[in-house]
Image: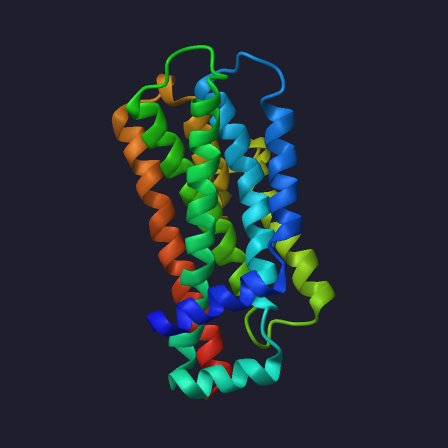
């Protein structure tokens, strides 16, 4: 499996598909930190939202790195379609993790914040970035699963889901009580963003619940992804 992850990373780097999202990420960070000083956690919330969409772009490009015929050869080589798609998701997550480290550490090294950054700030910022970025990657991977539909349908559904997951707080308050349980099916990107913006106003228990809820949701998406792909290759 490690050999397949290394192979997929090399294929992606050679394809140069990483350059457009990376360039857009750099431009967004320049705009975000052009005005100084900046509030710590509010800035991390903004950069995490940027990385949320950039990670979806990363993963979408990663999913099209190999030609379909080459993909079939890779699946035959690894002898298990689930291992192949899991390797692809892990490889994409490696690149996303490096991007998260860069986005979190860059403003600290540039000293653009309005106060000294504590270890708690950095840890919360890193966890928030990682959760949002990997969540976006898993959502994208699910929409790219075999048999989901045409590319136009995939792109439209993906963009709508990403926006809905971030904007759900605007309309959840208007939901009747009997519809509120449906919000558990919406990706919890809004809740992670809200934790980053309002960490000082929340209890530790509230922080832990939100930050633990997202990995559970990510795990559920991975199971859905593997289920969809395994059904296609039966």
Query: Height in image: 175 above or below 3?
Result: above
Residue at horizontal 49%, vertical 15%?
Answer: 39
Residue at horizontal 62%, vertical 56%?
Answer: 158
**Colour scheme used in the picture?**
rainbow
Query: Height in image: 122 above or below 1?
Result: above
Residue at horizontal 58%, vertical 74%?
Answer: 66
Count of numbered circles in the view: 0
Q: Position of residue 206 (x, y in %)?
A: 31, 30
Check the picture and name the quadrant holding the N terminus: bottom left
Q: Is residue 96 left or right of residue 12?
A: left
Q: Is residue 161 left or right of residue 134?
A: right
Q: Position of residue 59 (x, y in %)?
A: 55, 58
Name the residue at the right extreme: 152
Q: Position of residue 104 (x, y in %)?
A: 44, 32
Q: Is residue 188 visible?
A: no
Depth check, front residue: 224 or 36: 36
Q: Is residue 91 visible?
A: yes
Q: Position of residue 19 (x, y in %)?
A: 63, 51
Quarter where residue 50 is shown = top right
């Amino acid at each position: 499996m490690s050999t397949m992850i290394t192979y997929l990373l090399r294929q992606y780097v050679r394809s140069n598909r990483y350059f457009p999202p990376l360039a857009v990420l750099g431009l967004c960070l320049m705009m975000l930190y052009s005005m100084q000083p900046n509030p710590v956690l509010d800035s991390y919330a903004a950069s995490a939202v940027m990385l949320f969409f950039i990670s979806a772009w990363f993963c979408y490009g990663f999913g099209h790195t190999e030609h379909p015929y080459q993909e079939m050869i890779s699946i035959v080589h690894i002898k298990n379609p689930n291992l192949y798609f899991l390797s692809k998701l892990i490889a994409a997550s490696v690149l996303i993790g490096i991007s998260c480290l860069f986005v979190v550490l860059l403003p600290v090294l540039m000293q653009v914040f309005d106060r000294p950054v504590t270890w708690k700030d950095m840890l919360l910022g890193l966890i928030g970035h990682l959760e949002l970025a990997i969540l976006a990657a898993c959502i994208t991977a699910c929409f790219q699963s075999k048999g989901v539909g045409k590319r136009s349908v995939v792109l439209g559904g993906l963009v709508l889901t990403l926006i809905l997951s971030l904007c759900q707080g605007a309309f959840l308050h208007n939901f009747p009580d009997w519809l509120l349980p449906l919000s558990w099916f919406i990706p919890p990107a809004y809740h992670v963003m809200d934790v980053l913006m309002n960490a000082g106003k929340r209890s530790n228990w509230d922080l832990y619940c939100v930050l633990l809820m997202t990995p559970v949701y990510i795990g559920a998406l991975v199971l859905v992804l593997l289920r969809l792909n395994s059904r296609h290759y039966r």
